[in-house]
Amino acid sequence: MQIELNNELLIGKGTRRSCYQHPNDASLCIKISTGTPNSIKQQARESHYYRALEKRGVDFRHLARYEGPIETNLGTGHLYECIIDHDGSYSKSLNHYLKTHKGQRDELMLKFSNLEGYLLDYGILFYDLNGGNIICQKDAQGELRLVMIDGIGEVISFSFLNFFKVHRDKTIKRRWQRVVNQVNKKLNSANFRS
């Protein structure tokens, strides 16, 4: 059965994919590739990587789950867990919270820094993490859970070295430092200080 998607269901649009609310299940969203060769490759790599994480028994508490491909009127899409708050609204990004909830910055930055340990513990590689694709899911008590919704996996062709924990850990630490630098740069910008 083909799922019908339209602009009313559009949650967000990136450079390589658009994200739509699943019309029949609020707990799911559908990512549709823009159709460029790079976007198709990205989706194939990401799908493969998520399946590998599942086989390894990775704890998905900080990752949006991948549920597999689905046919839509816009072409083949891919189902992911839709990160929503306790009240049913779409969870906001880390960037949003850092900008609008200045009183929670220390708590958020601690949670953010703890993500590095999670990535290292489970050997999770990423290529494009930033404060826009780390989402803060709020529960009924106001507690926030950080969830990475995009940029997970590996983009280099010769990734065999990442099978070795020492090399993989170095890769994660090096890339994580770039994420930290990006988030700190945003925090120090005039836009975030005002």
Image (cartoon, rainbow, N blue to C red):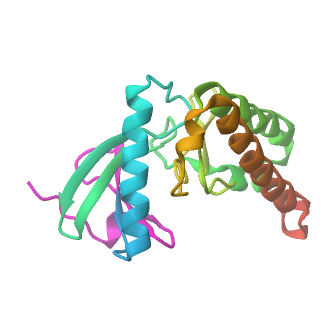
Q: Quadrant of the N terminus?
A: bottom left
- Give the percent coordinates (x, y) of residue 11: 43, 62
- Give the percent coordinates (x, y) of residue 51: 36, 37
Residue 104's place in the image compared with 114, above or below, is below
Q: Which residues are magenta?
A: 1-30
Residue closer to the observer: 176 or 27: 176
**In terms of image quadrants, where is residue 170?**
top right
Residue 95's place in the image compared with 73, above or below, is above
**In terms of image quadrants, where is residue 190?**
bottom right
- Give the percent coordinates (x, y) of residue 36: 38, 77
Q: Does the magenta-highlighted stretch encompass residue 92? A: no
Q: Does the magenta-highlighted stretch encompass residue 23? A: yes
Q: Residue at x 53, y 51 (%)?
A: 154
Q: Residue at x 79, y 58 (%)?
A: 182
Horizontally, is 48 left or right of 178 in the view? left
Horizontally, is 97 left or right of 63 in the view? right
- Give the percent coordinates (x, y) of residue 27: 35, 41
Residue 7's place in the image compared with 93, above or below, is below
Q: Residue at x 52, y 38 (%)?
A: 63
Q: Quadrant of the C terminus?
A: bottom right
